[in-house]
Amino acid sequence: MKNSTFKLVSLGLLFLLVGQSFSQQNSSALLYEISGKQLSRPSYLLGTFHAICPTDMLPADKLTDYIDRTDQMLLELDLDDPAVTQTMVGGLMMKDGKTLKNLYTDAEYAKVDELLKSTIGVSAEMVKNIKPSMLAVMIVTNPKSLGCTPSAVDMIVMQAAAAKKKPVNGLETVAQQMAFLDITPLKKQAQDLYKMAADPQRSVDELKSMMAVYRAQDSDKLFNVMAKQMRNERAMQTKLLDDRNKAWIPILEREMKSSPAFIAVGAGHLGGLNGVVKLLRVKGYKLKPIRL
């Protein structure tokens, strides 16, 4: 598979696993202007969607206008670094020689094999070393499943910044982000992939519904959808969202003070009591919602 596919799939998993959004003063947006606290010029915070149909994409020309107002871009990962891609590819694989056959009975393996062939057009043997959770995302975000060729908002804004020769930096290392993908044990990942084989359309429909909410720039509704899906997995939400959000704040403060930044992270990181928007407001910054 091409490296760009691995980028999209890896980022897509994080969004599918978790997410929430939050608003203040009855405002709901995916883009915020950050000012105050002696910042010389505003920075901007964008909630992204890591695997989205073009019809649900935010208007790229309007995003570019805000990117032009800043001097640097901050993403979850530095996506324009070739070394990031190489490390990411390795992180998608199971360790210690494990394969899909180690995780299923013969009957279950046959069912998963059938699912893979009918969606992404490969046999289980061809992708036997890839983590089940990654295979699940590859299935759901496959053009045949979605009826479109998905793009990643992160990649769109990164390319816009690179075209203007603005520096692009990551808030996390690949090793850190790959570790988050391993929070769910392989056994549970395998069970979830097998369940998908029984009703793959359900996962596709859920993703499409989130795309529609994203297109409407309704972060409050997006929060409700995600919170419902995560209602029984609070511990995972804490590790994948809350803890990471808190770790990002000192980095964001340092970078915004250094020079105005366009910050693009998964939309799930914007909201909630421990979301980036709330945490920055608590620090004394003003975050103004912007509708595109």
Image: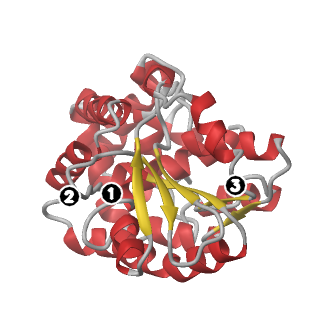
Q: Nearer the viewer, mark 3 or mark 1?
A: 3
Mark 3 lies on a secondary structure that is loop
Q: Is residue 247 visible?
A: yes
Q: Is residue 235 left or right of residue 232?
A: right
Between residue 202 and residue 282, name the one nearer to us: 282
Q: Earlier in the sequence, mark 2 or mark 1?
A: 1
Residue shown at the point (41%, 81%) measured from the top left: 283
- The mark found on residue 70 in the picture is 3
Query: Please, what is the three-letter code of the amino acid marked with disc 3?
Result: Thr
Query: Please, what is the three-letter code of the amino acid marked with disc 1?
Result: Val
The answer to the question of whether label 2 and label 3 lie on touching residues, with beta carbons closer than 8 A, is no
Q: Is residue 48 left or right of residue 136?
A: right
Quadrant location, the N terminus: top right
Residue shown at the point (33%, 46%) measured from the top left: 193
Q: Earlier in the sequence, mark 2 or mark 3?
A: 3
The answer to the question of whether label 2 and label 1 lie on touching residues, with beta carbons closer than 8 A, is yes
Within-10-Å neighbours for mark 2: few <14, some 14–19, many 20+: some
Q: CA distance from mark 3 to mark 1?
A: 29 Å
Please name the residue that numbered disc 1 is placed on: 18
Q: Is residue 128 visible?
A: no
Residue shown at the point (65%, 38%) measured from the top left: 65
Please name the residue that numbered disc 2 is placed on: 230
Quadrant of residue 92 within the rendered picture: bottom right
